[in-house]
Amino acid sequence: MRAVAINWTDLETAFERNAPDTESFLDLRSGEVVTVAQGAIDYAETRAKVQAGGDGFLRVEPAASREQYKWMERFVVGVTDEALHERLVIAIDGKGAFRRFKDVLLNYPTERERWFTYRGDLLHWNMQKWLEKEQIEPKEAAPWGVAPEPAEDEVVLERPQTATGEGPGEILRRQAKELIDLVPAVELPAAIAFLDFLRERGVGELGRVKAMPVKRTAA
């Protein structure tokens, strides 16, 4: 085992960051985390520092995006508020799911806090298992203590089923496009302005409005 004085805050950030143009490395001598991001001003300098350090730097393996998406699905399954549950099912469908999921929870502080606790436990468990795999023994215990082992029960998020296989978000986007086609051209500027409002401020201003129910069509 290698004893390392880990910077827990930076390591946690590195584990939750999953971007194709960014890599993080744990300095096994200082315990600091060095992040190499393409496009950053110090990219070349930082990359050279890591390469020159050789085995002294260990690449951090962040939680995969697909795995973090499963965390959201499992969380949504446990949401008992029907209106919020419906909104979250729609939010995590399609590109931009992580951002929409967080936006929806902004208006539900209790559930938002529960999500942070739930996600934090899973993230810390992943960090813990990674350190064990790499045979690294922290010189100081993590501030959150020992992460609890997650339940192994497989949960399945039920989604509306359609003959076309569309997800709930896709259904609503298609319905919106169909409605736009029916709007007279003279009214389109107002319609577009309203859609811009929903995109930019709708979460905060209209977040408490119950989501439009999605019709379930038999497959």
Image (cartoon, rainbow, N blue to C red):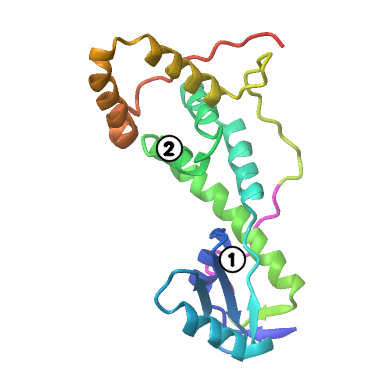
- Residue 188, disc: none
Q: Which tag, 2 or 1, sits closer to the chain's start?
A: 2
**Residue 180 percent location from the top left of the image:** 38, 16
**Front disc: 2 or 1:** 2
Q: Are marks 2 and 1 in contact (CB under 8 Å)?
A: no
Task: Determine the secondary structure under disc 2.
Answer: helix
Real-space Cα separation, disc 2 to disc 1, in angstroms:
27 Å
Asked which quadrant contains residue 165, the reply is top right
Binning the other alpha carbons within 10 Å of mark 1 as few (below 14), some (14 to 19) or many (20 upward) gives: few
Q: Which residue is mark 1?
A: 145
Q: Residue at x 54, y 87 (%)?
A: 49
**Residue 15 percent location from the top left of the image:** 58, 63
Asked which quadrant contains residue 2, the reply is bottom right
**Residue 55 percent location from the top left of the image:** 69, 87
Q: Residue at x 63, y 38 (%)?
A: 74
Q: Quadrant of the C terminus?
A: top right
Task: Determine the secondary structure under disc 1.
Answer: loop
Q: Which residues are magenta?
A: 141-150
Between residues 207 and 110, which one lies in front from this camera angle? 207
Q: Is residue 54 above or below residue 90?
A: below
Binning the other alpha carbons within 10 Å of mark 2 as few (below 14), some (14 to 19) or many (20 upward) gives: some
Q: Residue at x 47, y 85 (%)?
A: 45
**Residue 67 percent location from the top left of the image:** 66, 49
Q: Residue at x 65, y 47 (%)?
A: 66
Q: Which residue is mark 2?
A: 105
Between residues 61 and 193, which one lies in front from this camera angle? 193
Q: Residue furthest front?
A: 185
Between residues 150 and 160, which one lies in front from this camera angle? 160
Q: Type of residue at label 2?
A: Leu
Q: Is residue 189 above or below residue 102?
A: above
Asked which quadrant contains residue 204, the reply is top left
